[in-house]
Image (cartoon, rainbow, N blue to C red):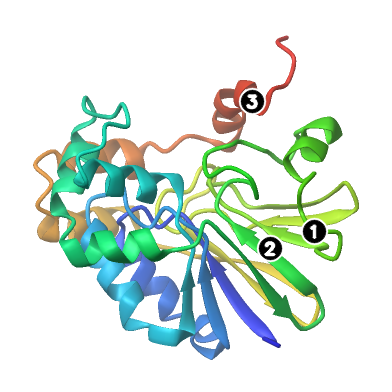
């Protein structure tokens, strides 16, 4: 049974952000690092995959919707993103080894964690890799997305929406560590620790100018400067993100 887990999610090809989180003493001391999907779709997708692979057995990698979509595009499968330059470029960067790595990642995984018991790790929801649930999603919505979760699982860890939160939903604790690479709301790389039955949220503060400079110097994505200006310099606030995501959780229109 694992006693101390560092939970990361939504790195989105931002290698310097990942490296700073991996350098955190609490992450280095963790028994296991679980990364809850969307490692790719960003300016350094293969570099992030390679760094995660270097962690070996210390890391468990969940596949997110962005990872699946880039993998499918690299395999010649249309996912409706042919007009997205970052997706087209990112899919072309994947080597056969990267495609094989992504294909072998689970979409969900249950691990026994000391103080928690069985914990289900997934990207978006236990049943779908791009379904949206939010901190303020109504109970009926949570009942829908958790209906097939085994009764013994009392904790679910997910990502996808890039905003950290923890809430009780249908007698289960749901934990979202936020995003390492593309946070909404406050800046910085967000992550969490599971230890002795408690979840602790953490943030690694990163200077935006330095992050942009480092990625611009190493990424081969042709529009990297413009993309970073939008994604890093002008990220969505949590209020904006909740407003945009809200209709996708099935809530009634206002």
Tell which residue pokes out farthest to the top in this image. Answer: 254
Query: Who comes first in sequence, dot 3 or dot 2?
Result: 2
Alpha-carbon neighbours of circle 2 within 10 Å: few (<14), some, or many (≥20)? many
Q: Which mark is residue 53?
A: none
Q: Residue at x 55, y 32 (%)?
A: 241
Residue 21 lies, with reference to residue 26, above or below; the image says: above
Q: Where is the C terminus found, in terms of image quarters? A: top right
Give the left or right position of residue 111, taking residue 20 as reference: right
Quarter of the rendering containing residue 84: top left
Give the left or right position of residue 201, taking residue 30 as reference: right
Q: Where is the N terminus found, in terms of image quarters? A: bottom right
Kindly state the secondary structure of the residue where label 2 is placed. strand
Residue 246 lies, with reference to residue 172, above or below; the image says: above
- 1 and 2 marks in contact (CB < 8 Å): yes
In terms of depth relative to the viewer, which is nearer, 58 or 230? 58
Quarter of the rendering containing residue 110: bottom right
Q: Which residue is mark 2?
A: 120
Quote the CA–CA distance across marks 3 and 2: 24 Å
Q: Residue at x 57, y 52 (%)?
A: 159
Alpha-carbon neighbours of circle 3 within 10 Å: few (<14), some, or many (≥20)? some
**Residue 147 in the image: x percent, y percent?**
80, 44
Query: Who comes first in sequence, dot 3 or dot 1?
Result: 1
Give the left or right position of residue 83, taking residue 153 as reference: left
Query: Who comes first in sequence, dot 1 or dot 2?
Result: 2
**Residue 73 in the image: x percent, y percent?**
24, 41
Kindly state the secondary structure of the residue where label 3 is placed. helix
**Residue 94 in the image: x percent, y percent?**
18, 56
Q: Which residue is mark 1?
A: 150
């Amino acid at each position: 049974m694992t006693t101390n887990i560092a939970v990361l999610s939504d790195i989105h090809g931002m290698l310097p952000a990942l490296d700073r989180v991996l350098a955190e003493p609490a992450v280095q001391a963790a028994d296991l690092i679980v990364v809850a999907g969307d490692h790719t779709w960003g300016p350094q997708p293969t570099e992030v995959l390679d760094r995660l692979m270097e962690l070996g057995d210390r890391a468990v990698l969940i596949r997110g919707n962005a990872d699946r979509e880039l993998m499918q595009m690299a395999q010649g499968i249309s996912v409706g993103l042919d007009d997205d330059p970052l997706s087209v470029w990112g899919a072309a960067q994947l080597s056969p080894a990267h495609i094989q790595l992504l294909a072998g990642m689970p979409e969900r995984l249950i691990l026994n964690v000391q103080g928690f018991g069985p914990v289900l790790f997934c990207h978006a929801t236990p049943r779908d890799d791009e379904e949206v649930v939010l901190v303020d999603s109504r109970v009926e919505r949570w009942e829908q997305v958790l209906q097939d979760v085994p009764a013994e699982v009392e904790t679910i860890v997910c990502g996808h929406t890039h905003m950290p939160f923890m809430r009780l939903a249908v007698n289960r604790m749901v934990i979202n560590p936020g995003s390492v690479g593309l946070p909404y709301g406050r800046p910085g790389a967000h992550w969490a620790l599971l230890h002795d039955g408690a979840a602790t949220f953490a943030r690694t503060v990163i200077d935006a100018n330095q992050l942009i400079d480092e990625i611009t110097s190493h990424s081969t994505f042709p529009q990297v400067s413009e993309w970073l200006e939008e994604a890093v310099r002008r990220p969505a606030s949590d209020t904006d993100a909740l407003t945009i995501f809200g209709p996708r959780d099935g809530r009634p229109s206002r």
